Image (cartoon, helix red, strand yellow):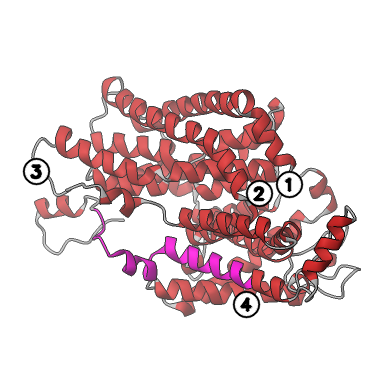
Amino acid sequence: MQDTPSAPDPEQNQEDDIVVAAPRRSTWSEMRTAEDWWAIWIGGTLLVVCFLVMYFSLPADFAEQVKAAEAAGEKVSAHSPLKPWLAKPGSWTDNPVDSLFPPEKSSLLLPIGVVFLVSLIVFSIGVTAMGQKAPPFAIGFVAVFLLATLAYILTGQAVVKSYNLEYALWALMIGLVISNTIGTPNWIKPALKTELYIKSGLVIMGAGVLLNRLLILGLPGIYVAWVVTPVVLISTYFFGQKFLKMESRSLNMVISADMSVCGVSAAIATAASCKAKKEELSFAIGLSLTFTVFMMIALPAVIKALGMSPILGGAWMGGTIDATGAVAAAGNLLGPEAEQVAVTIKMIQNILIGVTAFGVAVYWVSCVEGKESGIKPDAWEIWYRFPKFVLGFIAASAIFSLLYVSLPGGDVVVPAMVKESSKVFRGWFFCLAFISIGLETNFRELAKFLKGGKPLILYVCGQSLNLILTLLMAWLMFEVFYKDVVTEVFKK
């Protein structure tokens, strides 16, 4: 992440080495070119298509069928016409080829090919709008998708399924093996769009999280995310300055934000606000990636070993694991309840990116630099740093919740649409993201971040505090004060 200096001026080199805030663009410009907005357009478009295909396939007298079924105390059935056209590899026992050619179907190659083609088209359009050339992305995407297919095939093995080893873990391990042995080929790297894949999948996931459930989870989730996070951030920064005596305040702040808020995104936003050096940002991101990979595998195992409920475990992971994609992966290992709780809390925590960047900028200008700096924070900084894809998740939840309660047979139509079409895309997008995480993580390159020293001590101590306080708050919210309400909503 180093800049090439235009002249051998040491002062200029020092300035070039500082992370600066990206030039602000209009919201309209960002809606056309920014990753968060393209995650909304991709996820939203697929949801609209999946629903319209489902809706227009319903019989003309569907409303009358619903009324007749209700009068008889029964429910009508509905199925998406897209179901035969969208698939992932199936189960197998001895021969992995059976996952692609199951006995009940002649072949899954065509529906998997449809998913591949649709995914390639929508993501190619997105990356092109964001300024990247489509051909290199498409070439790399073929490899990423094939590796994701391999992860699904491994997941489908009968013994593996009995141990509940989900596709997220296999996808991550495949990527890690490649990146840490032969290395990730350069021609694949243009397709490693972890954030775009995971954000698009999360927007799609919103259709399956009904608004009443989101609101109920959100209330205790606010306590977990908005109370613990600032306490951990401030405490970690104070610990680094007063006890560890860290020489670089900016490094101290970036690590504190990275670890307490939500990983890389918070680190980048905070680094610009406190004018951190680029190697400091790289250092903080390296620590985050290393511990994220470890925690997304270790925490689900610890939660199972301790016998925690999936809801409590999901809340704990949502508030402590740094990256949104890793939270979704870890939650998936514990089941759908844990995944929904974990992702909801992480979404709530992501909102603090803008608030954190704004607060750090104000603090740095007024308390650290002591003189006029290049940063002029204002209230718009919060909107500028706000993760816009969260809006897509909330909008999808609100719209499909409305359809669920207002559409005749909506309680049948919406779940069928989600289960038989949009959920397939969501699963593939998540799998692509986990493959990308593995391919982007090279432990040899990150080894220097794990050497002894104050930054490592800071991260470990801060994350330990984060784990303790988040678990305590999650237990109070989800097992004491709101236990009955949360349990009841998951029964529906």
| Residue behind mark 3 | 372
- Give the Cα distance between marks 4 and 3: 52 Å
User: Is disc 2 in contact with disc 4, using a CB cutoff of under 8 Å?
Assistant: no
Density class for disc 3 (Cα within 10 Å; few <14, some 14-19, many ≥20) is few
Label 4–label 3 contact, CB within 8 A: no
Q: Nearer the viewer, mark 1 or mark 3?
A: 3
Q: Residues within 10 Å of mark 1 (few under 14, many from 20)?
A: some
Expressed as whole percent of the image width and height from the top left, the position of residue 256 reads 36, 34
Q: Position of residue 346 (x, y in %)?
A: 51, 43
Q: Let me know if residue 480 appears in the view.
A: yes
Query: Which residue is at the front of the view, 179 or 15?
Result: 15
Q: Which residue in the structure is indicated by mark 2?
A: 169
The Cα–Cα distance between marks 2 and 1, rounded to whole angstroms, is: 7 Å
- Measured Cα–Cα span from mark 3 to mark 2: 48 Å
Q: Is residue 231 left or right of residue 210?
A: left
Q: Could you say whether the residue bearing mark 3 is in a helix, strand or loop?
A: loop
Q: Are marks 2 and 1 in contact (CB under 8 Å)?
A: yes
Q: Which residue is mark 1?
A: 165
Q: Nearer the viewer, mark 2 or mark 4?
A: 4
The numbered mark at residue 117 is: 4
In the rendered structure, which amino acid carries the disc numbered 2?
Leu
